[in-house]
């Protein structure tokens, strides 16, 4: 079943103030446009939040704004990549799209890295890295100062293991941060867009895409984006106003 409930406020991330309560009240009463407006105001005043983006996506979906719903679910996923509610709603919205694109399958190692990376979100990888680093240093001190041969061997083995895990957590955190900051993807907002061969109206028509589709931006020129679809082959130019960067 499609999840449309309001997510709970996580302490320290979403201010449980009057604006938040009013937005939730509007949503519960079916006033989705008013709720969406207030969620956007909260984002403008307090910064990004996976919970607000998720709720905003729900409010947009209730208004049949497929592009806006997909956009906000994608933004929520960037901040909380392992959240099952976000992933479920994201899959649901993708299934409703007119365009069905056969995605290029990543190699196993890339898929595995992404799955492992998404176990934690936000600054959690930084905390994991610092914790493992401190433990590595403690184990190193045991190795250096211990007078017992057995303890020295065990502490050195554990030190090497924790140092390896620390390096892995640093890499996964760095990889996740890069993906979060990467703004090369966009969601189509126009009902229908004709993809052109050149960054102007005089170019030939290549193919048509529709609202809600996610595309990759590979170039910019004037008022046009050069986009590529997830099949890794189809590409062309679209007006900038027809898409919103994630």
Image: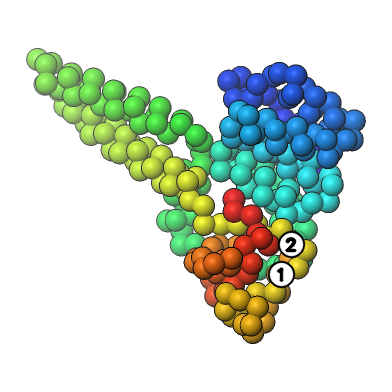
Does 144 appear above or below 34? above
Residue for badge 2: 190
Label 2 and label 1: CA atoms lie apart by 6 Å
Does 192 appear above or below 178? below
Which quadrant of the rendered structure holds the N terminus?
Answer: top right
Q: Is residue 132 visible?
A: yes
Left or right of 176, for residue 150 = left
Asked where in the image residue 150 lies, by quadrant, the reply is top left
Left or right of 68, for residue 232 = left
Q: Is residue 229 visible?
A: no
Asked where in the image residue 235 lies, by quadrant, the reply is bottom right
Q: Position of residue 162 (x, y in %)?
A: 29, 31
> Which one is in front, 202 or 117?
202
Residue for badge 1: 193
Which secondary structure lies at badge 2?
loop
> Which one is in front, 153 or 214?
214
Disc 2: CA contacts within 10 A as few (<14), some (14-19) or many (>=20): some
- Rendered residue at 65%/78% (across/down): 201
Mark 2 and 1 residues: CB-CB less than 8 Å, in contact? yes
> Which one is in front, 95 or 14?
14
Q: Position of residue 41 (x, y in %)?
A: 70, 33
The residue lying furthest to the front in this view is 222
Asked where in the image residue 9 lies, by quadrant, the reply is top right
């Amino acid at each position: 079943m499609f999840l449309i409930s309001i997510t709970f406020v996580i302490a320290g991330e979403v201010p449980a103030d009057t604006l938040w309560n009013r937005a939730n009240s509007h949503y519960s009463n079916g006033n989705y446009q008013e709720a969406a407006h207030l969620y956007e105001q909260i984002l403008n005043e307090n910064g990004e939040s996976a919970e607000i983006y998720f709720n905003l996506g729900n409010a947009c979906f209730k208004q049949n704004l497929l592009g806006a719903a997909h956009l906000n679910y994608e933004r929520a996923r960037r901040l909380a990549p392992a959240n099952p509610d976000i992933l479920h709603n994201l899959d649901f919205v993708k299934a409703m799209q007119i365009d069905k694109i056969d995605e290029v399958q990543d190699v196993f190692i890339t898929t595995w890295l992404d799955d492992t990376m998404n176990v934690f979100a936000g600054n959690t990888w930084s905390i994991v890295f610092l914790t493992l680093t401190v433990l590595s240093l403690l184990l190193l001190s045991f190795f250096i100062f211990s007078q017992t041969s057995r303890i020295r061997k065990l502490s050195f083995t554990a030190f090497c293991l924790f140092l390896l895990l620390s390096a892995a957590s640093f890499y996964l955190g760095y990889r996740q941060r890069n993906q979060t900051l990467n703004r090369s993807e966009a969601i189509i907002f126009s009902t229908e867009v004709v993809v052109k061969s050149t960054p102007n109206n005089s170019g030939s028509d290549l193919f048509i895409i529709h609202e809600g589709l996610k595309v990759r931006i590979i170039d910019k020129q004037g008022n046009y984006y050069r986009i590529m679809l997830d099949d890794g082959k189809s590409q062309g130019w679209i007006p900038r106003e027809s898409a919103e960067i994630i």
